[in-house]
Image: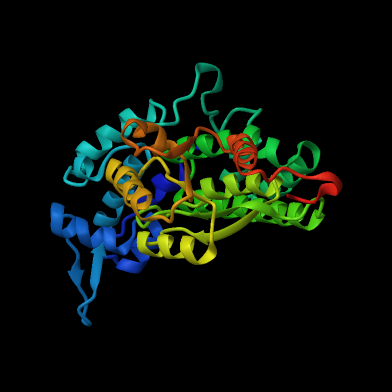
Amino acid sequence: MDTPFADLLAHAPMPDATWSIAEVERDTGLGKDTLRVWERRYGFPTPARDAAGERVYPHQQLQRLRLIKRLLDAGHRPGKVVPLDDAQLEALLAQARSEPAVGDALSPASQPPRLGDPDTPWLRWMADNRTDLVKQALQQHILRHGLGATVEQLVAPLCVHVGEAWLRGELSVYQEHLFTETLQSVLREAIATVDASGQTLQRRPRVMLTTTPSELHGLGLLMAESFFALESCHRLALGTSTPVADIVLAAQQLQVDVLALSYSAHASRRDVVDTLQQLVEQLPRGVEVWVGGAAVALHRRGLPDGVTVLRRASEVHLQVHAWRLRHGTALAWGGVPI
């Protein structure tokens, strides 16, 4: 690929083009509320208004927002990058391209492969828009190696590689989105297959999976759910961005044992520490909080007491086993849970 598709878009002559706030949200992944908050707090973006009084964004501002989103995904904080001009953003991005993302540092032996390497077909498939090959290869890997091994040994590192390729401009936004949707589809199919196998009935702990309001990324949560499924846990998936009050209410009404949360690398200290403190204080007594993700590792020292940190999704197995021993829910004879 001589010139990345994202760079072609960036240099296309579109001086008069404008974009609605919904279009900017779809293109960049930055939420409408986030864009409005930045407008008030940092003085950028500065949208115009159409005939109906709705916000419209010039193409130059859309390009700048794309740069900002790349830097946020690399671990930078909004207050440090949103006020910067284009030249400063480009300089930061050039620096980020040569470093691993915050919370995702790789050893030299496992640095993300480049698209041109002959032994890295995954990234080539995505660059060529061959999501059918990505899906087929993922399904075959699960059949050969199992769901747990696929998530830990293939999916987790592949997500880092894709994020790095996008940061370098080797994959466009839409290609990264296609990869994520394909991966989520395959994992959901595999989880359904595990449930349908019926080797054991679903049993405690009753686990509720979600993310807090500012966290829009659900892939880490789905990876964790794969391991909860393999442990035959009752699972209650609420999706992403659930308000704290609703998480507490659901935990009460659904009588959950464990609240499982995921925080991606872009989450701020406030997103992680403050919301977890609220949940620990408000959740019904006996509900355990298990958390994972790059931001959790980054802000681990500030976490409230009583929160269980999962460094990898595969640690679900150990935590579930320990929970069942503590609560006397080991299997009795005949496979019937006590």
Residue 170 falls left or right of residue 145:
left
Residue 140 falls left or right of residue 82:
right
Residue placed most toward the observer, 115 or 210: 210
The x, y position of residue 38, in whole percent, is 20, 55
Which colour assignment does the render follow? rainbow
Residue placed most toward the observer, 60 or 54: 54
Q: Above or below — where is 96 with respect to 244?
A: above
Residue 49 appearing in the image:
yes
**In the image, what residue occupies the spot 38% across and 26% down?**
99
Q: Above or below — where is 246 with respect to 94?
A: below
Residue 90 falls left or right of residue 221:
left
Quadrant hosting residue 53: bottom left
**In the image, what residue occupies the spot 64% across and 51% down?**
204
Residue 130 falls left or right of residue 36:
right
Q: Above or below — where is 183 with respect to 51?
A: above
The x, y position of residue 328, in whole percent, is 66, 43
The x, y position of residue 71, in whole percent, is 32, 40
Count the labels in the image.
0
